[in-house]
Image (cartoon, rainbow, N blue to C red):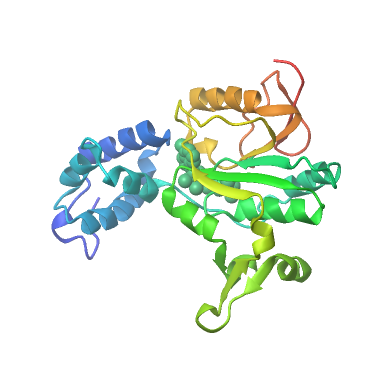
Amino acid sequence: MGLDAGAGAAGMLNDRDFDTVRELIAHYAGIKLSPQKRNMVYNRLLRRLRACGTASFGDYLALVQARDSSEREAFVNALTTNLTAFFREPHHFELLASHAQARAGQRQPLRVWSSACSTGEEVWSIAMVLREAGCAADIVGTDIDTEVLKTGSGGVYRADRVEGMAPERLRKHFLRGTGANDGLVSVRPELRTGVRFGQLNLQSSAWPAQERHDVIFCRNVVIYFDRESQNRLLARFADLLLPGGLLMVGHSESFPAAHPGFRSCGRTAYERLAGP
Ligand SMILES: C[S@@+](CC[C@H](N)C(=O)[O-])C[C@H]1O[C@@H](n2cnc3c(N)ncnc32)[C@H](O)[C@@H]1O
């Protein structure tokens, strides 16, 4: 690992520091970083080093590990990968729409959990589908990364993020910014009804008590977890889904396939069966 143009005194991310980073992020978030991620780690943490005014990666990592360190959160935030999009993997939203249509007009809201929601596009896509189906919504978006949650709950995006969305859908659910907000869109207040955001670490043993859900989205996050963590998570999702409820996972994640409590019901979608 060399220095980048502005690395200055921060210097190298040596083998020992890189190993420490990998151990810490596995411990805090369950994220397995491959050795190929060294450059990424270097660039992302260099910004934190500078923000904290620490002289070396060694000093910075000591700060992260200090008791009650306020830097730990920023360390985790810096190392998460937050790629997402509105209506990403659209087949899940088609399935959700038919599930929601069956509940249309009922007072009982459809309870949906977006469990690694990143900057919120997944949450707002769910909210749009439920609203279009005339189905009351109780949607919670959670993520380990506190920075992305701010964007999600703000509900304000660059207009290019909604390019490709049907114009009618865009008009129905978003307001276009003007003046200083030109180039931005904001979700309409009506869409915010029944939508909440909060921090939750999927690897933590202590989750807040939750009622059972009709649908759980857990997409494009367990690829970073080891098999044991995936199975543990799946058992918890099985407990938290109502019979007939749906679990949506990412395009390269088939971890629920072997679980006796689930049956496949479409591309990377699983239905919770009745029983244990
Ligand atoms: C690639 S994004 C996926 C976003 C969205 N689900 C999608 O498919 O478009 C992965 C998200 O998982 C979050 N994440 C990583 N480890 C986590 C953990 N242990 N608990 C909760 N969220 C986590 C990251 O912060 C990131 O926002």
Q: Quadrant of the C terminus?
A: top right
Q: Position of residue 273 (x, y in %)?
A: 76, 23
**Does 55 sit above or below residue 169?**
above
Q: Residue at x 29, y 39 (%)?
A: 21
Farthest residue in the top direction?
Answer: 276
Direction from residue 214 to residue 121 in the image, left or right: left
Asked if residue 38 can be seen in this view, the reply is: no
Q: Residue at x 54, y 27 (%)?
A: 230
Q: Residue at x 71, y 47 (%)?
A: 137
Q: Position of residue 223 (x, y in %)?
A: 53, 37
Direction from residue 186 to residue 23 in the image, left or right: left
Figure quadrant of residue 235: top right
Q: Position of residue 207 (x, y in %)?
A: 50, 30
Asked if residue 95 can be seen in this view, the reply is: yes
Q: Position of residue 46 (x, y in %)?
A: 26, 55
Direction from residue 21 to residue 166 in the image, left or right: right
Figure quadrant of residue 73: top left
Depth check: 227 or 161 in front? 161
Q: Residue at x 17, y 43 (%)?
A: 58
Depth check: 72 or 18 in front? 72
Direction from residue 34 to residue 209 in the image, left or right: right
Depth check: 138 or 227 in front? 138
